[in-house]
Image: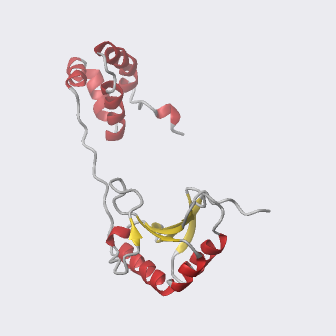
Amino acid sequence: MSEKKNPWDKSGQWPEEMNALKAIIDKTELVEMTKWGGPVYTIDKKNVIGIGGFKSYVAIWFWNGVFLKDSAKKLVNANEGVTKGLRQWRFASKSEIDNDEALILHYINEAIANERAGLAIKPKKKETVISAFFQSALDSDAEFKNGFEKLTPFKQREYLEYIDTAKQEKTKATRLEKITPMVKSGIGLNDKYRQ
């Protein structure tokens, strides 16, 4: 039986490099798991690193790489302005990995220590903003308001966004009419899609 294709190995051209990285990672206490279809290495079931091949490089990424000292200046933010904690170390050849093995191991062990110390970027809680249109609907229907308040903040935000993304008042009113029985019944906007 053939080995499953790693979705993080976009090109399939890095088998030696991937194996070299795995051999280094095997020298640590990290546990390999498959998440999102690719290899992720964890400690106490928390993501520490992952590996993958792309068109012009193979990479090891550190979930909370922002906390690594990176004295050798090897890490890059793959998605500047979007990615908060994740950092990548990119390699163009197996010899590059072999030459940096001790340093790679050092970075991985530092990442493990940081995970154990609880260093992580905590996601910011989204603030629920209720528009004047939606607030007037809540104020005019006690049953609707009661149902809305019983929903989780996530489900509340889904409804608010659904109403507020309508450009015309007529569309907002139509959408409000549609969701009112769902809110009163405690049903989330997208519950039918969540299984």
Label total for image: 0
Give how far across and how far down residue 57 sits, in percent. Answer: 54, 66
Q: Residue at x 20, y 21 (%)?
A: 139
Picture quarter containing residue 115? bottom left
Write the residue at 36% across / 34% down: 158
**Please, is residue 124 above or below residue 136 in the view?**
below
Image quarter of residue 145:
top left
* Placement of 73 over or under 183, stated as above or below: below
Q: Quadrant of the N terminus?
A: bottom right
Q: Nearer the viewer, residue 150 or 37?
A: 37
Which quarter shows the C terminus? top right
Q: Which residue appears at 32% of the width and 71% of the height?
A: 67
Q: Position of residue 71 (x, y in %)?
A: 34, 81
Q: Nearer the viewer, residue 40 or 56?
A: 56
Asked whether 99 or 173 is in front, the reply is: 99
Query: Which coloring applies here?
Result: secondary structure
As drawn, is 69 to the left or to the right of 97? left
Answer yes or no: is residue 182 visible.
Answer: yes
Residue nearest the viewer, comparing 180 with 172: 172
Q: How far across and down, in percent of the image, does residue 9 sit?
A: 60, 61
Q: Position of residue 84 (x, y in %)?
A: 33, 59
Give the quarter of the image for residue 131: top left
Instruction: Farthest residue to the top: give it.
Output: 170
Q: Is residue 40 visible?
A: no
